[in-house]
Amino acid sequence: MSTPSDTPSPQLFFETINAFQRTAALKAGIDLGLFTAIGSTPSTVAEIAARCGCPERGIRILSDNLTILGFLTKTESRYALTPSTAVFLDTHSPAYLGAAMDFLLAPGLTEAFHDLAATIRQGRLHTTEHGTTAPDHPAWLDFARAMGPMMGPAAEGAATLVPLDASRDTRVLDISASHGAYGIAFAKNNPRAHLVALDWEGVLAITQENAAAAGLGDRFSKIVGDAFTVDLGSDYDAVLVPNFLHHFTIVECTRFLRRVHAALRPGGKLVIVEFVPNEDRVTPPPAAAFSLVMLGTTPEGDAYTFTDYQKMLSEAGFSAAKCHPLPPTAQSAVIATA
């Protein structure tokens, strides 16, 4: 007798082909302020509708669907936020992630997946030549403005893995600094560290603003330009490379890492933060699936395994590479010594 898992079913097909409806429901909840309207008080449809300024029918259907998706709970006639929804989707929470929607659903990103088959047939992007790797791509302004809170846990985790010498002044270079969360975390954990942020000029205005808000105004400077060609400086105690290498080929990454090695003082630390799938490239799913994002948005980017990073780092002159998961995120820190 067959078990349910052995019985052919079209369920996965329909769930996947209609996944855009899940995105639309979540976006509607954020746009309407539904999660904030519920807050810490379980509420009826009528109460939520009144707070959102909407007719009850749409709020009822949306709330039921958000319950099915796992964003809400429903007890009798009252809806409540799950613990994760309360932390990440209520605007009163300091960890609110709703603003990340502006980046994640930006047309420049979503349109890249409208004809993924064409990209695969051509072997590279069919929509633009450089995708999100183009100089000064406007998507990175949205990223810098919206994604900082999401990076907080990974940034804090990475900073605790590499304590700097507290007996002297130290220097930290944050490459592709964006929102600055990683460099700021290192600077806050090391009171004698000076933070140098590298990115495009428009993005660095946001980095500098965030650094000043963190009280680092007198320990902050910046380098404007392309990380592959601009003068990086030298004598750094740590160089941070968060969410950058996945945009490029292994050959390009290795060439870039040689530049980073030259910028570090002997014994200095390189801290890479990335989605690092296992060698099978299908587990763990959140990290492994990131390769599809790179397929759709970059010319030749990928999600690289730790073995890939070991090879790149060895060829660039680094030693003692180790991979450290950064829970509760899907990312890992790959740390190596110059």
Image: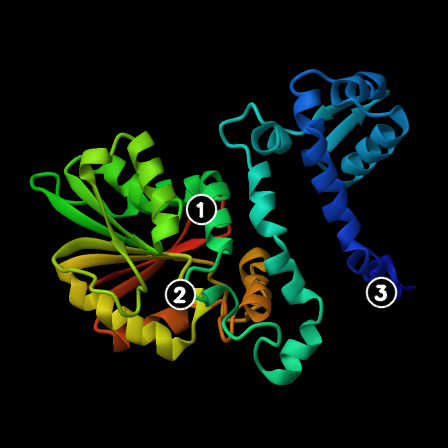
Name the residue furthest bottom. 122
Mark 1 Cα within 10 Å, few/some/many (few <14, many 20+)?
many
Residue behind mark 3: 6
Residue 265 left/right relative to 100: left
Residue 283 left/right relative to 254: right
- Report, in whole angstroms, how far the alpha carbon at label 1 lies from the one at label 2: 17 Å
Find residue 134 and report its horizontal and vertical position in percent: 45, 67
Which of labels 3 and 1 is toward the front? Answer: 1
Q: Amino acid at mark 1?
A: Ala
Whether residue 319 is visible, yes or no, is no
- Report, in whole angstroms, how far the alpha carbon at label 2 lies from the one at label 3: 40 Å
Residues 228 and 201: in front is 201
In the image, residue 78 sits, relative to residue 295, either above or below, namely: above
Secondary structure, mark 1, is helix
Secondary structure, mark 3, is helix
Q: Are marks 3 and 1 in contact (CB under 8 Å)?
A: no
Residue behind mark 1: 144
Mark 2 Cα within 10 Å, few/some/many (few <14, many 20+)?
many
The first of marks 2 and 3 along the sequence is 3
Which of labels 2 and 3 is toward the front? Answer: 2
Find residue 55 and report its horizontal and vertical position in percent: 87, 25
Residue behind mark 2: 245
The first of marks 3 and 1 along the sequence is 3
